[in-house]
Image: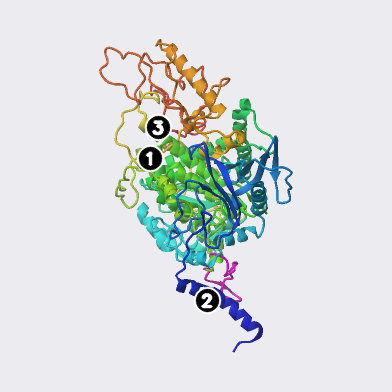
């Protein structure tokens, strides 16, 4: 019999099991509860509510206002419309409804009264009854609620105080309390423990997952190594890494010390033409290289290719994490403004302020570098190694973008999720530090992953028919990163995730021998779901908008030993220079003497190498690889303005973006979804009465249509019927000084001009314009237009218009009779 403190401890241990047994016997499961019409999570408590409240709808929700009841729980701020259907008590729980916002996502609370605005904090005191409640969120949303005159003043003040005291900014310890509020109930823990994982995607958590990826890519000559199974070689790398078959684990262990954080060159992806993409950190300085170490290092670096390796330096051309953080902060301030201090950017300086944030410049730089790597991989029969100081930030961005450009599988929802899991979650991107959930390490905070999502959106907006996933999916992923509930983002590497899940195994030390590794989590902590469990986050109606139908992806062509090469220039280059290593930096190839430390003449380094040094005479051959795409797509006599003959589209050709100023857009569905709320929060309007800015834009559009009719010689008389209201997503704001269109324009009707009498065929949208048509805005030298949120009218992204990266010193080939204009 147990007595005293032992008895108390034993009873405390048995309480959760007893409670779960009682719930299972009584038939209680993790189902939602209906409290005043709100579908509550198991264990969720309603702290306060207010009736007869109106919520301002966003553009995606149809604009206007909807009436309902506002709730505040210890996990979220929820809004239930009056006409919403009755919740199903037997349905599985959903964390957030369509009109809800998590308390952890709220950044500040602002109330609006008669001719006054106040920022509400937990210690604030209100001397007036608020008329409106505005919630500024970390995901750039602005949620606006309008209290009706019939709403009791006591409810208005109480729910305002409750939200202000409950949302409090995150600090050490508050993340765990927020997780317990959402997932800490016994029913919710049991529900999450029995949750099945998505079997349609690759999680890259075991050796079999990596072997499945090798088989999918047809990458022969590579194997999965478990040399880092206990995280002894590198604490930031995953347990399983892919290395050449000819390198044994005993030799591989000697190579980790030569790279920062032990992040050795490792395989990421194989191009269908046979080229391999690798990632690695910078070399460690002042390390003595033995002869055997040199042989192993070069075998790892060259992989299965014995002729050519190109090291792509990422640190010089791409932004640093500090630059990304500064640019995102400026973009955030520009997008939302601050209604509590009445600080906003004037309309005539909005575009220049947007340019000064440099966010679009950084997006363009990442896409340009990824395009260069994609063109190199297309050449075939070479190894491209992405090198970064620590290989945990921009290496994730570029390697992921390259695979999105070149692999159609990565443009599907499950393929994209597998890509993020491989190149970000398992590769050791510091999500926990970069997101800075606790707000205790501002120096490490940088939204690198959000910059990657913006780059993917640029590719999606220019090539919508080549993606199965939609911008709704990207937006949902963008919003989920601000919710500290998912295991994917609450750790910096696989080792930290294993420590929390108590799945570390054993570690060996010469003194203590084999011992179990200690876990950093409490057994009572709730199990954290993965971000890919979308049914736990969104309703089926929202999830259905994540994908769109696309043509089936044709299977890969069989490769000869995994190395299919059809480029004659590459054959001549690789056959003549075995063992060559080149550096690609700032668009220029070079052969620096200190590229590989063991090949330099510094002291303390073994100088001899079993491979020949690279020669600068072969650099033009590499430059031809970057030009090969342009020469193949635009033969002699064709330019970008002249459409080339359209043949069958190869799905594995690089999906290169257009990087000119008019082609780079701002992700308005993300960055500007709260802008109109912040501008017009005190002027409730409906869908039938648009905002004054929209009415002004409509008048400008009508004037432009009349000017276009006059310039073509048609009847300039105004139409007798009023123009129909423009859609909310095709709203135009035009600055007449610089001709800049802030929102995508709707397609205009074609001018009523008679076709040429000699022509019998109808003109298509992809063909050259007729002789009687006015010159295009993009082709006119006197008009400078910048389309920030989409393509100009009638100029959609064509598959034959792509960006062609070329070195700075390279010039267009002479004698071609035409130039390839950018």
- The answer to whether residue 690 of the structure is visible from this angle is yes
Q: Which mark is residue 630?
A: 3
Magenta segment boundaries in residue numbering: 503-526
Residue at disc 1, secondary structure? helix
Q: Give the side of residue 79 with respect to residue 384, left or right.
A: right
Q: Which mark is residue 195?
A: none
Majority secondary structure of the magenta segment?
Answer: loop
Which residue sits furthest front? 150
Q: Which mark is residue 18?
A: 2
Foreground: disc 1 or disc 3: 1
Crowding around mark 3 (Cα neighbors within 10 Å: few <14, some 14 to 19, many 20+) is some
Q: Quadrant of the N terminus?
A: bottom right
Residue found at x 29% / y 49%? 558
Residue 56 x, y percent position in the rendering: 55, 39
Front residue of 360 and 574: 360
Which residue sits furthest bottom? 1
Residue at disc 2, secondary structure? helix
Residue found at x 45% / y 66%? 194
Residue at disc 3, secondary structure? helix
Foreground: disc 1 or disc 2: 2
Give the CA distance from mark 1 to mark 2. 54 Å
Total numbered circles:
3
Q: Earlier in the sequence, mark 2 or mark 3?
A: 2
- Residue topped by disc 1: 466
Q: Earlier in the sequence, mark 1 or mark 3?
A: 1
């Amino acid at each position: 019999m147990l007595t005293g403190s032992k008895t108390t401890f034993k009873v405390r241990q048995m309480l959760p099991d007893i409670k779960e047994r009682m719930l299972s016997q009584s038939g209680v499961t993790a189902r939602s509860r209906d409290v005043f019409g709100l579908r509550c999570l198991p264990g969720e408590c309603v702290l306060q509510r207010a009736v007869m409240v109106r919520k301002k709808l966003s553009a995606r929700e149809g604009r206007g206002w909807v009436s309902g009841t506002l709730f505040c729980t210890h996990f979220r701020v929820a809004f239930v419309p009056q006409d919403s259907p009755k919740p199903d008590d037997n349905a599985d729980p959903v964390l957030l409804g369509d009109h809800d916002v998590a308390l952890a996502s709220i950044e500040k609370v602002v109330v609006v009264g008669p001719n006054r605005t106040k920022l509400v904090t937990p210690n604030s005191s209100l001397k007036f009854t608020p008329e409106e409640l505005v919630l500024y969120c970390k995901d750039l949303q602005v949620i606006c609620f309008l209290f009706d005159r019939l709403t009791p003043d006591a409810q208005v003040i109480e729910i305002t105080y409750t939200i202000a005291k409950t949302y409090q900014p995150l600090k050490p310890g508050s993340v765990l309390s927020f997780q317990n509020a959402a997932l800490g109930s016994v029913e919710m823990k049991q529900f999450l423990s029995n949750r099945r994982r998505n079997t349609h995607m690759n999680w890259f958590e075991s050796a079999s997952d990596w072997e499945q990826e090798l088989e999918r890519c047809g990458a022969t000559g590579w194997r999965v190594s478990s040399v880092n199974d206990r995280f002894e070689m590198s604490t930031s790398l995953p347990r399983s890494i892919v290395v050449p078959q000819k390198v044994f684990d005993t030799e591989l262990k000697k190579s980790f010390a030569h790279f920062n954080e032990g992040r050795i060159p490792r395989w990421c992806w194989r191009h269908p033409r046979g080229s391999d993409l690798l990632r690695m950190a910078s070399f460690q300085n002042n390390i003595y290289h033995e002869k055997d170490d040199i042989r192993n290092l070069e075998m790892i670096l060259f992989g299965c290719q014995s002729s050519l390796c190109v090291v792509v330096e990422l640190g010089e051309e791409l932004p640093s994490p500090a630059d990304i953080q500064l640019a995102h902060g400026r973009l955030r301030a520009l997008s939302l403004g601050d209604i509590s201090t009445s600080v906003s950017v004037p309309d005539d300086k909005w575009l220049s302020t947007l340019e000064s944030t440099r966010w679009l410049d950084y997006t363009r730089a990442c896409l340009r570098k990824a395009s260069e790597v994609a063109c190199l991989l297309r050449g075939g029969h070479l190894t491209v190694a992405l090198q970064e100081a620590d290989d945990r930030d921009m290496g994730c961005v570029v390697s992921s973008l390259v695979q999105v450009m070149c692999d159609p599988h990565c443009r599907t929802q499950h393929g994209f999720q597998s890509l993020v899991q491989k190149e970000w979650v398992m590769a050791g991107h510091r999500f926990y530090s970069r997101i800075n959930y606790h707000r205790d390490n501002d120096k490490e905070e940088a939204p690198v992953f959000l910059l990657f999502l913006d780059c993917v959106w640029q590719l999606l907006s220019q090539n919508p028919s080549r993606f199965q996933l939609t911008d709704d999916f990207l937006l949902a992923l963008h919003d989920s990163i601000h919710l500290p509930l998912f295991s994917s983002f609450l750790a910096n590497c696989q080792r930290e995730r294993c420590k929390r899940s108590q799945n570390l195994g054993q570690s060996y030390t010469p003194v203590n021998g084999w011992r179990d590794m200690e876990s950093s989590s409490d057994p009572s902590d709730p199990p954290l779901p993965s971000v890919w469990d979308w049914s736990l986050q969104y309703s089926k109606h929202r999830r259905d908008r994540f994908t769109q139908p696309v043509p089936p992806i044709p299977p890969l062509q069989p490769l000869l030993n995994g190395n299919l090469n059809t480029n004659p220039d590459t054959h001549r280059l690789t056959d003549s220079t075995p063992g060559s290593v080149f550096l690609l930096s700032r668009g220029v190839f070079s052969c620096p003497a200190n590229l590989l430390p063991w090949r330099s003449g510094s002291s303390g380094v073994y100088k001899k190498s079993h491979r020949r040094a690279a020669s600068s005479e072969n650099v033009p051959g590499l430059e031809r690889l970057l030009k090969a795409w342009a020469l193949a797509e635009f033969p002699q006599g064709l330019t970008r303005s002249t459409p080339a003959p359209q043949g069958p589209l190869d799905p594995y050709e690089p999906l290169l973006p257009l990087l000119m100023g008019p082609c780079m857009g701002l992700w308005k569905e993300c960055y500007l979804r709260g802008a109109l709320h912040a501008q017009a929060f005190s002027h409730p309007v409906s869908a039938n009465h648009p905002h004054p800015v929209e009415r002004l834009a409509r008048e400008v559009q009508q004037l432009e249509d009349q000017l276009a009719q006059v310039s073509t010689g048609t009847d300039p008389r105004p139409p007798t019927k009023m123009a129909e209201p423009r859609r909310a997503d095709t709203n135009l704001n035009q600055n007449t000084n610089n001709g800049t269109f802030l929102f995508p324009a709707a397609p205009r009707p074609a001018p009523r001009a008679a076709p040429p009498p000699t022509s019998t065929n109808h003109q298509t949208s992809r063909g050259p314009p007729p002789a009687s048509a006015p010159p295009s805005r993009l082709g006119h030298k006197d008009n400078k237009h910048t389309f920030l949120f989409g393509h100009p009218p009638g100029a959609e992204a064509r598959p034959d218009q792509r960006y062609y990266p070329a070195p700075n010193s390279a010039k267009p080939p002479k004698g071609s009779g035409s130039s390839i204009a950018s």
